[in-house]
Image (spheres, rainbow, N blue to C red):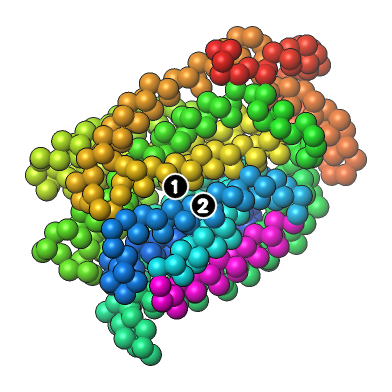
């Protein structure tokens, strides 16, 4: 039995493909997985490896060599987010026009060069400059690849694929911890460079060559792909299967894009709910590492290794939540479970006067709770299935909110000088946890309200796919049936009904 056959059998066991999927489509999705997830995951891994390296370097001696006293680590992290924030939305709009297979790898080469620059900084000011440019050039990575990943898969596939993509963040952070331990133990002082400086050198050596993978494998989006690994029939099938599931083709960037984004309640509600949810597990990162660092019984290597536990818990949680949400065919249920765990763990840390075992439980629990937060983007992508450009920009806008929060809140609520107690930070986390639980039902209510009004984007897209089906029939036999099977007999009536109610779609938060 060949490797491909074994892979397909394993995929069936874990429900990687929907049971009703044809053999031809399974083979296509298998190829899409390799093409889309290979570069997206590698690029995201190297980004997080480079970004998280500063925390490990700080613990390993950067603080003393660069005089990072007081809250200077917080300011250095904030400078990264300043650069990261500036180009988010323009980058994803540009990505819908430029070839992704060249644009995204070029950005990776640039942030790899600036990561290397960290190894040779001599002052705090030089470090701030490097942090800004790493942030600025890394802008395209997460939002760009998130747009690519969420443009290729149907609703029953998005949770699992976003889980794979989401696991890359904790993997990068974990690997940075192990890499710093190795650099500190084996390279400290080699060629006159401190161990923490070698960490940035090694990160750059890993990052820059990885960009070449994107040039060969990144397939852009389905209706603009030029991938040499997909046949003409497969390219047509890629578009057809998404139309069948209610995901529209590209409509282009025009003057009406802003109205398509901001005239819809989705951007406002998902912006608030998503960013509240993303921020609540914050203590599982830097606060956890600095709490470990405050314990005299742990050396540098032990702190770096123990700090990876929350990331390991996050990886398991992301995978379980991704598969579970696809199985349940909703995202909110898993997020509700995560919200309860987040609240309990943050209350424990706010109280603080508990045993070290209870603190470990709370920090690791927040790592576990990071898993459901990964479902925000696929949920938004599903509900913006009718407009590829608006979806791409909305993902970027959502992430800009997270960047701004990470720029401002840590400076106010999580200053390094308050470590490890962080009373203000844990109070903030408890408050945001409560707000997130209160607001989570809002998008569910609004989506159900739309359905009662007869507004259904996906049905309308299936109905409006008739012209596409006719064109496909001339090019490749059988592809049209994939869409035709899912079209209701009264699709024309649905389209007419949808058009008549289209003006009602522009609901805003103030109208709710």
Residue placed at 23% from the left, 51% from the top? Answer: 419
Q: Specify the segment rendered in magenta.
A: 99-123
The reply to whether the C-beta atoms of the residues labelled 2 and 1 are less than 8 Å apart is: yes
Alpha carbon distance from label 2 to label 1: 7 Å
Count of numbered badges drawn on the protein: 2
User: What crowding class fits label 1: few (fewer than 14 Cα within 10 Å), some (14-19), or many (20 or more)?
Assistant: many
Can residue 13 be spotted in the picture? no
Left or right of 31, for residue 179: left
User: Closer to the camera, 476 or 342?
Assistant: 342
Q: Is residue 336 above or below residue 496?
A: below
Q: Does 270 lie within the magenta span?
A: no
User: What crowding class fits label 2: few (fewer than 14 Cα within 10 Å), some (14-19), or many (20 or more)?
Assistant: many
Tell which residue pokes out farthest to the top in this image: 453
**Percent of width and height locating residue 176:** 37, 65
Residue placed at 73% from the left, 22% from the top? Answer: 460
Tell which residue pokes out farthest to the right in this image: 474
Mark identifier at residue 100? none
Tell which residue pokes out farthest to the bottom in this image: 191
Left or right of 211, for residue 342: left
Where, quadrant-wise, is the C terminus in this rendering? top right
**Percent of width and height locating residue 271:** 52, 32
Q: Which residue is mark 1?
A: 407
The quarter of the picture where residue 202 lies is: bottom left
**Percent of width and height locating residue 82:** 51, 52
Q: Mark 2 or 1 closer to N-term?
A: 2
Q: Which residue is mark 2?
A: 82
Q: Is residue 230 above or below residue 387?
A: below
């Amino acid at each position: 039995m060949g490797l491909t056959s074994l892979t397909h059998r394993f995929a069936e066991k874990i429900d990687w493909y929907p049971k009703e999927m044809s053999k031809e489509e399974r083979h296509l999705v298998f190829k899409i997985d390799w093409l889309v997830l290979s570069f997206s995951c590698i690029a995201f891994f190297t980004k997080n490896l480079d970004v998280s390296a500063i925390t490990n370097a700080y613990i390993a001696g950067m603080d003393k060599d660069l005089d990072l006293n007081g809250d200077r680590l917080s300011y250095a992290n904030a400078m990264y987010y300043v650069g990261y924030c500036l180009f988010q939305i323009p980058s994803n709009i540009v990505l819908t026009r430029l070839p992704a297979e060249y644009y995204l790898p070029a950005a990776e080469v640039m942030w790899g060069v600036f990561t290397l620059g960290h190894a040779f900084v001599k002052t705090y000011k030089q470090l701030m400059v490097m942090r800004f440019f790493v942030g600025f050039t890394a802008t395209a990575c997460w939002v760009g690849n998130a747009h690519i990943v969420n443009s290729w898969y149907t609703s029953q596939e998005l949770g699992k694929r976003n889980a794979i993509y989401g696991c890359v963040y904790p993997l990068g952070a974990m690997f940075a911890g192990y890499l710093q331990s190795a650099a500190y133990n084996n390279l400290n002082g080699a060629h006159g460079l401190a161990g923490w400086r070698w960490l940035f050198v090694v990160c750059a050596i890993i990052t820059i060559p990885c960009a070449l993978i994107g040039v060969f494998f990144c397939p852009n989006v389905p209706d603009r792909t030029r991938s040499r690994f997909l046949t003409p029939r497969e390219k047509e099938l890629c578009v057809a299967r998404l139309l069948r599931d209610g995901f529209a083709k590209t409509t282009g960037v025009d003057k009406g894009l802003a109205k398509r984004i901001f005239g819809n309640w989705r951007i406002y509600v998902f912006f608030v709910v998503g960013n509240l949810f993303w921020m609540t597990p914050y203590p599982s990162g830097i606060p956890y590492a600095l709490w470990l660092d405050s314990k005299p019984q742990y050396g540098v290597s032990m702190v770096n290794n123990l700090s990876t536990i929350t990331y390991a818990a996050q990886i398991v949680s992301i995978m379980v939540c991704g598969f579970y949400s696809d199985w349940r065919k909703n995202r909110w249920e898993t997020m509700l479970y995560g919200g309860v765990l987040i609240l309990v763990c943050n209350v424990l840390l706010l109280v603080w006067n508990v045993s070290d075992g209870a603190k470990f439980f709370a920090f690791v629990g927040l790592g576990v709770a990071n898993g459901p937060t990964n479902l925000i983007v696929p949920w938004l992508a599903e509900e913006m299935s009718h407009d590829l450009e608006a979806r791409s920009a909305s993902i970027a806008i959502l992430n800009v909110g997270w960047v701004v929060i990470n720029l401002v809140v840590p400076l106010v609520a999580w200053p390094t000088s308050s470590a490890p107690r962080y009373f203000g930070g844990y109070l903030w986390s408890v408050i945001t946890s409560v707000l997130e639980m209160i607001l989570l039902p809002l998008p569910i209510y609004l989506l159900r309200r739309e359905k009662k009004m007869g507004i259904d984007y996906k049905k309308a897209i299936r109905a409006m796919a008739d012209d596409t089906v006719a064109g496909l029939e001339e090019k490749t036999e059988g592809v049209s049936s994939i869409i035709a099977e899912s079209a209701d007999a009264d699709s024309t009536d649905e389209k007419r009904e949808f058009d008549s109610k289209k003006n009602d779609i522009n609901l805003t938060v103030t109208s709710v």
